[in-house]
Amino acid sequence: MTQPDRAHHPEEPVSPEVERLVTDIIGRVADKWTLLVLEALEEHGELRFTAIGREVEGISQKMLTQTLRQMERDGLVIRTVHPVIPPKVEYRLTEMGHSLGYAFCGVWGWAQTNHAAIVAARARFDTRKAG
Amino acid sequence: MTQPDRAHHPEEPVSPEVERLVTDIIGRVADKWTLLVLEALEEHGELRFTAIGREVEGISQKMLTQTLRQMERDGLVIRTVHPVIPPKVEYRLTEMGHSLGYAFCGVWGWAQTNHAAIVAARARFDTRKAG
DNA sequence: CAGCATCCTAATAGATACTG
DNA sequence: CAGTATCTATTAGGATGCTG
């Protein structure tokens, strides 16, 4: 593992436009539903529309469609339509989709190890404000 | 039945509640402005309110306040008020804040190496839909 | 300087109904 | 089954004005 004592930017400095693009991409991709869909596809390999909906608890069909469409547009998933009746559409991650899941390991691990501390910090903050 | 062969979850399986909490935390923390503020503080160490606003180009004062307040509540930043006139308030990352920046290295790197591919994928998707 | 309060608009998300 | 379309409720966010 690299230990950059500074900078979570291991690479060289980038132009402001790229910087903004990169930040926007992260903001888009770090969306709650995208994360959960990514996780489901990472775990099961290939899933149909309804199956993803079952895996991602609480997602509305609208958000599922929207999320999948966005991920497809960004090149994170492949959408395969089987021309049968009833329709069968399967989704799987692209290489880039998989690499995103891998890249998120760090953040996922961070949230898992720190969620209790965060909840505690929130409680402290709230009582400090209230009391 | 679930065996994450490549798992972006290095840790053991967690309860659904924790899973949801963790996902919510990521969604919160991966917010565009939070990321940029994190970056600014990571780079400069300690900054005043207005200085952060200058670093984070395009942020409104309302969103800056809101973002900093949220980060403070979550235990990511320390807010130090110097009782002088005019007021001087300084912000710096906590240990947990720093570790978040470090955890994001992977995602940041992913976005930097893949942003061109994403833009290309979007273009392909859009022309496929239009043409 | 570092904010809070207020108003207002635009983007989002959910629920529901319908279709090839 | 895998969506689309539509309506509504909530939220996010910007602009502006004021204050210790």
Image (spheres, coloured by chain):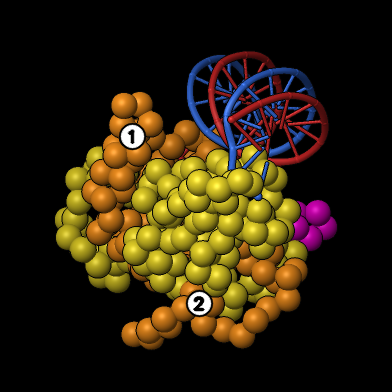
Chain colours: A orange, B yellow, C blue, D red
**A98 falls in the magenta region:** no
Is disc 1 placed on a helix, strand or loop?
helix
Q: Residue furthest front?
A: B85
Q: Is residue B32 left or right of residue A14?
A: left
Find the magenta span and give its range.
Answer: B125-131
The answer to whether residue B112 of the structure is visible from this angle is yes
Residue B25, image x and y in percent? 38, 48
Residue type beneath disc 2: Ala
Which residue carries the number 2 mark?
A7
Residue B54, image x and y in percent? 70, 59
Residue placed most toward the observer, B58 or D18: D18
The N terminus of chain A appears in which quarter of the rendering?
A: bottom left
**B129 falls in the magenta region:** yes
Residue placed most toward the observer, A123 or A87: A123
Q: Main secondary structure of the magenta part?
A: helix
Q: Earlier in the sequence, mark 2 or mark 1?
A: 2
Answer yes or no: are tags 2 and 1 on the same subunit: yes
The answer to whether residue A104 of the structure is visible from this angle is no
Quarter of the image for residue A72 reads bottom right
Residue A6, image x and y in percent? 46, 78
Q: Which mark is residue B87?
A: none
**In percent of the image, x 37 and y 57: which residue is there?**
A39
Which residue carries the number 1 mark?
A128
Location of residue B121 with respect to D4 vertically, above or below: below
Mark 2 and mark 1 in contact? Answer it, CB < 8 Å.
Answer: no
Foreground: disc 2 or disc 1: 1
**In percent of the image, x 38 and y 60: which residue is there?**
B94
Location of residue A37 with respect to A104 vertically, above or below: above
Q: Residues within 10 Å of mark 2 (few under 14, many from 20)?
A: some
